[in-house]
Amino acid sequence: VTELVELFIQQLLDGDGQSYKDVAPAIIQNGYKHFINDRQVSAEEFYDPGRRERNIQVGQELANERRKLFEEEV
């Protein structure tokens, strides 16, 4: 979501916001927000290095589990 908002803002600055016409009102009304997965968090939590490291670790563990499931099916 954050990358989408950053892209939206950049396109607005570049003068090309047509592709985000439908989401613009929600972004303007609610402002720029930070999300980790589907949970809204503060900017401090989003940019916390410890949180980032834990997210990487959890993501890797989930990827490993998916690989194991795939290998078992083959």
Image: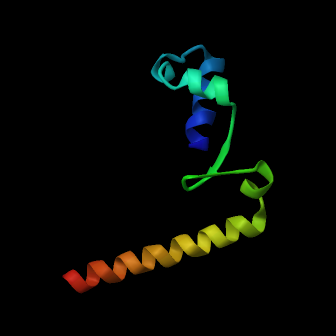
Q: Tell me the residue at 77%/49% (across/down).
A: 43
Looking at the image, the residue that sits furthest to the bottom is 72
Task: Locate the N terminus by quadrant.
Answer: top right
**Residue 49 position by quadrant:** bottom right
Query: Viewer-proximal residue, 71 or 54?
Result: 54
Instruction: Please say which color scheme the image uses.
Output: rainbow
Query: Viewer-proximal residue, 1 or 29?
Result: 29
- Residue 9 in the image: state x and y as whole percent: 64, 27
- Residue 65 in the image: state x and y as whole percent: 41, 80
Looking at the image, the residue that sits furthest to the right is 44
- Residue 19 in the image: state x and y as whole percent: 46, 21
Query: Viewer-proximal residue, 67 or 44?
Result: 44
Query: Viewer-proximal residue, 49 or 39?
Result: 39
- Residue 18 in the image: state x and y as whole percent: 48, 16
Q: Tell me the residue at 36%/78% (across/down).
A: 67
Task: Locate the C terminus by quadrant.
Answer: bottom left
> Taking 10 as reference, is 35 above or below it?
below
> Taking 68 as reference, is 20 above or below it?
above
